[in-house]
Image (cartoon, rainbow, N blue to C red):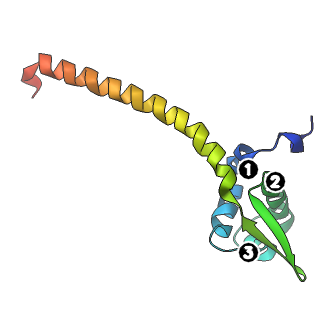
Amino acid sequence: MSIEARRDVFQAIADPTRRQIINLIVQKPMNLNAIADNFQISRPAISQHIKILTECGMVVVRQEGRERFCEAKLESLSEVATWVDQYKQFWNEKLDSLDSYLTKIQSKNPENE
């Protein structure tokens, strides 16, 4: 199985540079040079990050004359939100249980008040 076949939104957001690129273009579409100007890495490296974001469905690149503009498509982040929600529920239940336990202990030992 090739790497491209396994790319998904989780891989897209795993890299801090790709997260920064998404943060830049979510506000307005930008051309590749404008994106690259915000980083201390080469333009080919930025192009590789854009390619991965495109393959993951998080960025659309459109041609306007000689310029290529990158536009964020964040609908796929709902997959991340769904994944995180299951753990959010888990931790909420654990913290609620801890709160109940601490309240129970405190009520049995009034000198701690």
The x and y percentages for residue 105 are 19, 18
Task: Please tell me whether mark 2 sits on a helix, a strand or a loop.
Answer: helix
User: In the displayed structure, does residue 105 sit left or right of residue 78?
Assistant: left
The residue at the far left in this view is: 111
Using the image as rendered, state which of residue 37 and residue 27 is in the foreground. Answer: 27
State which tag comes first along the sequence, 2 or 3.
3
The x and y percentages for residue 102 are 24, 23
In the displayed structure, would residue 93 be above or below residue 68?
A: above
Task: Look at mark 3 in the image and give the residue it sits on.
Answer: 30
Task: Look at mark 1 in the image and give the residue it sits on.
Answer: 12
Query: In the rendered image, is residue 68 in sight?
Result: yes
Q: CA distance from mark 2 to mark 3?
A: 17 Å
The disc label shown at residue 52, or none: 2
State which tag comes first along the sequence, 2 or 1.
1
The x and y percentages for residue 98 are 32, 24
Q: Residues within 10 Å of mark 2 (few under 14, many from 20)?
A: many
